[in-house]
Image (cartoon, rainbow, N blue to C red):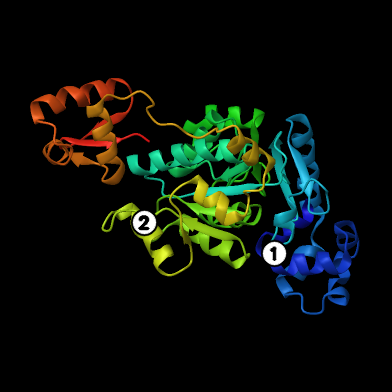
Amino acid sequence: MALARIGYYHLASIMQLYRKVGSAAAIIEHSREIRDILPEATPKLVDVLRDSAAIMTRAEEELRYDQANGIRPIVISDPDYPKRLAECDDAPLVIYYKGNADLNTTRVVNIVGTRRCTVYGQDLIRRFITDLATLCPNVLVVSGLAYGVDICAHRQSLASHLPTVGVLAHGLDDLYPPRHLSTAREMVTNGGLLTEFMTRTNADKINFVRRNRIVAGMSDACIVIESASHGGALITADISRGYGRDVFAFPGRVGDTYSEGCNHLIRDNVAALLTDATDFVKAMGWEGDAELAKARKEGIERQIFTELTADEEAVVKVLSIHNDLHLNMLSVQTGIPVNKLTGVLFEMEMKGMIRTLAGGMYHLLN
């Protein structure tokens, strides 16, 4: 824990030193002769290691706090440390974990995106995770517990009975944003909270960038739901690709601000185009899962609106192809007169099948 604290600004050197020596204790014990072990160690790292006594005291305080509050420090050599993350050159030496999810479960995906998730993005998340839970019920969903796509992914995972882990940019003695506290508490009992930071660490901007590598590194694949042309989700996607992970993105309408990033990822061949969970499972080669085979054998498929009138079927068919249509355009494409269509749409809205948007637009809830 002390070595990880020392290595905050010297991560590459500390990891090189750790892998060479093989023991954090040995490094601390020989902290005044580091140049003998690693001749290329920077002067600043040498100085920090020489004055490690205060940091050791801080680590001891942290350990006492963790033991008293159900937080488990997991070192990189621990079998419970995420093995996918351990393979990365810039993996943290220690992570702090509170939860019950298996961080080394067979399937791990991260879902990331904009903090300004649109209705379109929310529907994608709900549909994707709901279907994924049927196809791969043992998958672990990882995200960052931030506003927008992150929190939607966590909440939908909980609703779909999938374990979900939030990777934080601060210590486990606090939660940012505080508005997500109730969800975080629920995640501890069906997933968990994870960070590389000791307690009393603020959620500084640089920490959010650093935590993205953990989100990427502990996962098999990165899924970008919505993103502007610049954003943290694109950083996570880029890191994921650098780690050799599969990257996917849902396309969006040309010109939509929060679809530009996804469309660019697909255009530049950084991410594979994704339309639904079945596409994803097929692309990952997860079709052979026993759960998926059983689901197909028993005919467990997602059914949408099983009892529809002829007019409702016409509306669903049109909105499935061209979602978010104005009343008049919907009337033209369904062939249903406006005066009759308004009643049909009202009934569909009461059944939770569609949603009314601003400007007289109608959105199909898949």
Identify residue type, mark 2: Ala
Q: Is residue 327 above or below residue 104?
A: above
Where is the C terminus found, in terms of image quarters? top left
Q: Is residue 46 above or below residue 299?
A: below
Residue picked out by circle 2 = 228
- Residue 163 place in picture, x, y as percent: 63, 35
Query: Which mark identifies residue 190?
Result: none
- Residue 10 place in picture, x, y as percent: 69, 66
Q: Is residue 192 left or right of residue 345?
A: right
Query: Which mark identifies residue 11?
Result: 1
Q: Is residue 32 above or below residue 138?
A: below
Front in this rendered view, residue 239 or 289: 289
Q: Are marks 2 and 1 in contact (CB under 8 Å)?
A: no
Q: Residue at x 31, y 41 (%)?
A: 320
Front in this rendered view, residue 104 or 273: 273
The secondary structure type at the circle numbered 2 is loop
The answer to which quarter of the image holds residue 239 is: bottom right
- Residue 174 place in picture, x, y as percent: 59, 36
Say if residue 92 shows up in the picture. Answer: no
Nearer-N-terminus badge (2/1): 1
The secondary structure type at the circle numbered 1 is helix
Q: Residue at x 46, y 68 (%)?
A: 269
Say if residue 311 shows up in the picture. Answer: yes
The answer to which quarter of the image holds residue 126 is: top left
Identify residue type, mark 1: Leu
Dot 1, how many residues are within 10 Å of its Cα: few (below 14), some (14-19), or many (20+)?
Answer: some
Q: Residue at x 29, y 35 (%)?
A: 316
Q: Residue at x 24, y 21 (%)?
A: 347
Dot 2, how many residues are within 10 Å of its Cα: few (below 14), some (14-19), or many (20+)?
Answer: many
Q: Is residue 189 left or right of residue 151?
A: right
- Residue 313 place in picture, x, y as percent: 28, 31
